[in-house]
Structures are given as structure tokens and as C-alpha cells.
Image: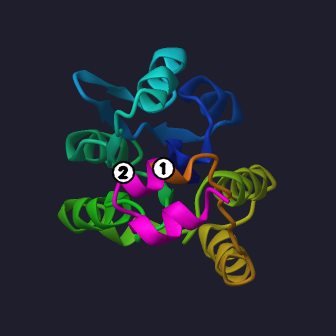
């Protein structure tokens, strides 16, 4: 049996992922004193805080939750499809947990090298393949092929936010206002 695991950068809520048969680990988010889990927070309050200039920070799911998830499926082949490693520590954490797991030979941590829409597509297609009886090796072969042919584009709504967060220097941020 194959179990697909992912994180909330697919924009699936835990309930949506469970309805698909996929396990999801929610990323941690904080913005000033507000702390919570991705897609489980009061998003109206969250966006209001950003509008006021507060900068959110995110981090990977707690390692203990990853351990518990891998242990839950210790008799299955696990494919954990994570957000791009350059955007989050989720991939590295999952790799570390895999190495500590008794069933590490049955766990593949797959760096999708993207997020959101393309990540969601890869997870949903992997789950469909699982349901059709494809093996973990066949699913991984498909994932690797699609990952190499997938591109992501981010279209920021607020370049000032990127400047405040340190992802954009002042000159490009200023020029983007024109």
C-alpha cells in the first residue's frame, strides 16, 4: 500500500486533504503575537495584520508531527511530497525524520520544487495514481518527470510586503510602484 503525505502549501485544508485520502501536515504561521497553523487561522485577521504592516513568518510542521505521521503508516510505502526546499525547511526536516524512522527504506521525501497550484496538482495526481493501483516507484517516476517540466510564477499583490520581509531590496520595490 502507498500513502501520500504532503504539507499545507498545497492549499488543501486538513479536511479537504483527508477527503481526498491524503494526509497533510500544516505549516506553522505567526504574525506578531498571533500564532497558528496554515489555513486554520482567522484569515481575515491575518490579512488585516499584513495590511497594517505586520510581517508573517512561517515554519515547517513540528518534527514530532512528522514522526507521528511516518509511524502511523509504518507498514506502507510513504511518499511525502513537500513544498520546495528553498522556500521552507519542511523538506529537510522530513528527510531528517526519515533517517530516524525504523521504516526509512519505505519512505520517500519528494521535493516538489514548487508550491501552491503546481504542488497541489502533483499531490492530487499522485493520489489518483495510488487509487488506480500504481506502485510507489511508478508514482515517483511520474512525479520526477512532471517536476522537471513544471514552472511556478508568483505575482505579488504588494511589493512593499516583499520589501519589509527582506525579499526585495528598496530600489526594485520603489520602481515597482510605477
Which residue: 31% across, 61% down?
89
Residue 84 located left or right of residue 65: right
Q: Is residue 163 magenta?
A: yes
Position of residue 122 measured from the top left corner of the image (x, y, whole percent): 70, 60
Which residue: 36% across, 51% down?
164
Q: Which mark is residue 106?
A: none
Give the spatial CA distance, label 2 vs label 1.
6 Å
Residue 68 located left or right of residue 141: left
In this rendered view, identify the residue nearer to me: 134 or 55.
55
For the image shown, how many numbered marks are present on the structure? Answer: 2
Disc 1 secondary structure class: helix
Residue 6 located left or right of residue 17: left
Q: Circle 2 is placed at which residue position?
A: 164
Q: Residue furthest right?
A: 132
Above or below 15: residue 17:
below
Residue 10 located left or right of residue 130: left
In this rendered view, identify the residue nearer to me: 42 or 60.
42
The magenta-colored residue range is 161-178
Pointer 2 and pointer 1: residues touching (CB < 8 Å)? yes
Above or below 168: residue 123:
above
Position of residue 48 measured from the top left corner of the image (x, y, whole percent): 48, 21
Quarter of the figure that contains the C terminus: bottom right
Q: Circle 1 is placed at which residue position?
A: 160
Above or below 47: residue 175:
below
Amino acid at each position: 500500500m502507498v500513502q501520500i503525505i504532503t504539507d499545507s502549501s498545497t492549499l488543501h485544508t486538513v479536511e479537504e486533504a483527508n477527503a481526498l485520502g491524503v494526509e497533510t501536515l500544516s505549516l506553522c504561521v505567526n504574525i506578531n503575537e498571533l500564532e497558528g497553523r496554515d489555513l486554520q487561522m482567522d484569515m481575515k485577521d491575518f490579512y488585516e495584520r499584513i495590511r497594517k504592516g505586520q510581517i508573517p513568518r512561517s515554519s515547517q510542521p513540528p518534527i514530532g508531527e512528522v514522526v507521528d505521521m511516518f509511524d502511523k503508516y509504518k507498514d506502507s510505502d510513504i511518499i511525502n511530497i513537500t513544498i520546495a526546499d528553498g522556500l521552507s525547511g519542511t523538506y529537510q526536516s522530513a528527510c531528517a525524520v526519515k533517517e530516524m524512522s525504523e521504516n526509512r527504506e519505505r519512505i520517500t521525501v519528494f521535493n516538489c520544487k514548487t508550491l501552491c497550484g503546481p504542488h497541489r496538482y502533483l499531490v492530487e495526481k499522485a493520489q489518483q495514481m495510488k487509487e488506480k493501483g500504481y506502485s510507489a516507484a511508478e508514482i515517483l517516476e511520474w512525479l520526477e518527470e512532471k517536476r522537471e517540466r513544471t514552472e511556478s510564477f508568483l505575482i505579488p499583490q504588494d511589493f512593499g510586503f516583499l520589501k519589509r520581509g527582506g525579499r526585495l531590496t528598496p530600489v526594485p520595490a520603489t520602481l515597482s510602484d510605477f
